[in-house]
Image: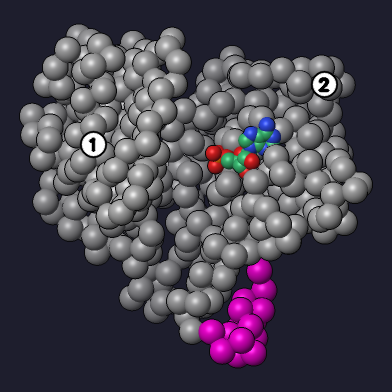
Amino acid sequence: MSEKILAVNAGSSSLKLKLFTMPEEVELFQGAADRITGSGEGEFSYKKAGGERVKLSLNMPDHEVAIGKLLEVLVESGAVTDVEEIKGVGHRVVQGGEFFKDSALSTPENLEVIESLNSLAPLHNPANVMGVRAFSKVLPNATQVLVFDTVFHQTMPEVNYLYPIERKFYDEYKIRRYGAHGTSHKYVSEAAAKVLGKDLSDTSVVVAHLGNGASITEVVAGKSMNTSMGFTPTGGLIMGTRTGDIDPTVITYLQKIKGLDADGMSDLVTKQSGMLAATGFSNDMRDVEEAVADGKHPHHAQAVVAFDMFIKRIADFITLYAADVVAGGRNVDAISFTAGIGENSSTVRKLVVDRLAILGAKLDEVANNTRGTVDITAENSKVKILVIPTEEELMIARDTVRLRG
Ligand code: AMP
């Protein structure tokens, strides 16, 4: 039977949602509230399927006000006639630790477990739980479901998730690689198998999720085997404002010479580094590409080096994970690009694939300039190269239906 399901992504000062008819997977409505704070005007926007995006400035002192307004426009736009039609709400939760091996129903006990993991995702988990509580209040008859970014990576073998530090740090404090973007990597690897016309159990894909946050995952037979993000989403690739992997003594050295405490250092590696720091001016890849292309741009020289660093790190991880697939006795069936940069930047895709000569990867320049789900492989390439727009909200809606039973 058809039912209406909401997928929600609540941040500390933002909230995004999409409404679907399931199981048909038809998107009916999307809405977003940004800058939800005690003071000033926030940004509010929504769009009914097939319609234009409507943008408003709105005072949203807290999440409950933002949610109330989103539900109001949901009814006004005709996506539902009554909010009681919404039978399930799926919530993105960033960190489920080792406790959650699958999505789960929201219960007081499960919310407590998530809160106990706050120190592993201090920016995200509290906001995610706040979102669950707010929706439970306004839609008490809908099933609330928790969908974790970390669950997909729980299949990683020990050899890939342990760090070379004393075992007690894992046993006592659960310090290990968790990864993130799991919902996206799962969606894209499953979609890649479909595009290839292969059984998931017989498919190996390296997924490059390249957005402001970015990660690469090795997916074999539908299971995450390794992923570039680590204990937190700061590890791995060079990102908008995050360092990615870095010699840990750079941090202790900087702490000493700058007199920074742990919070100050954490701020530096998560919010003030990455492309923003390396280019000296922007974490937005469109700005960076513009500065690289324009020899007269004041940040041209720095942007060129930073952009090369960014591309090389991506190609390095893809090569590493492809080698791991082969060492495991399988072939790499596809390399799949997704997320803001992966879906939209033909330049990034081209430069990355150019560095994958060892895999015999070659890209079709014409196909590379088309949009949507597209096979951009050149005829003489030894491995398929795909672009697959990610659909994290749809995955959340699918799990919500599954858990509603
Ligand atoms: P996401 O975090 O997935 O929303 O992706 C955000 C990133 O995608 C930002 O760095 C944007 O600059 C980048 N992006 C979006 N569109 C383009 C484009 N046409 N070319 C290059 N980068 C883009």
Binning the other alpha carbons within 10 Å of mark 2 as few (below 14), some (14 to 19) or many (20 upward) gives: some
Image coordinates of residue 89 in percent, x first then y, are 23, 31
Residue with the most extreme right position? 295
Identify the amino acid type marked 1.
Answer: Ile
Q: Is residue 150 left or right of residue 304?
A: left
Residue beneath disc 1: 67
Looking at the image, is mark 2 or mark 1 nearer the viewer? 1
Residue at image point 61% right, 19% down: 373
Q: Secondary structure at mark 1?
A: helix
Residue beneath disc 2: 364
Query: Cβ(mark 2) to ligand 1 < 8 Å?
Result: no
Q: Nearer the viewer, residue 43 or 112?
A: 43
Binning the other alpha carbons within 10 Å of mark 1 as few (below 14), some (14 to 19) or many (20 upward) gives: many
Residue at image point 42% right, 69% down: 175
Q: Which residues are magenta?
A: 246-260
Q: Secondary structure at mark 2?
A: loop
Question: Which quadrant would residue 31 be assigned to in this image?
Answer: top left
Q: Quadrant of the C terminus?
A: top left
Q: Is residue 213 left or right of residue 285?
A: left
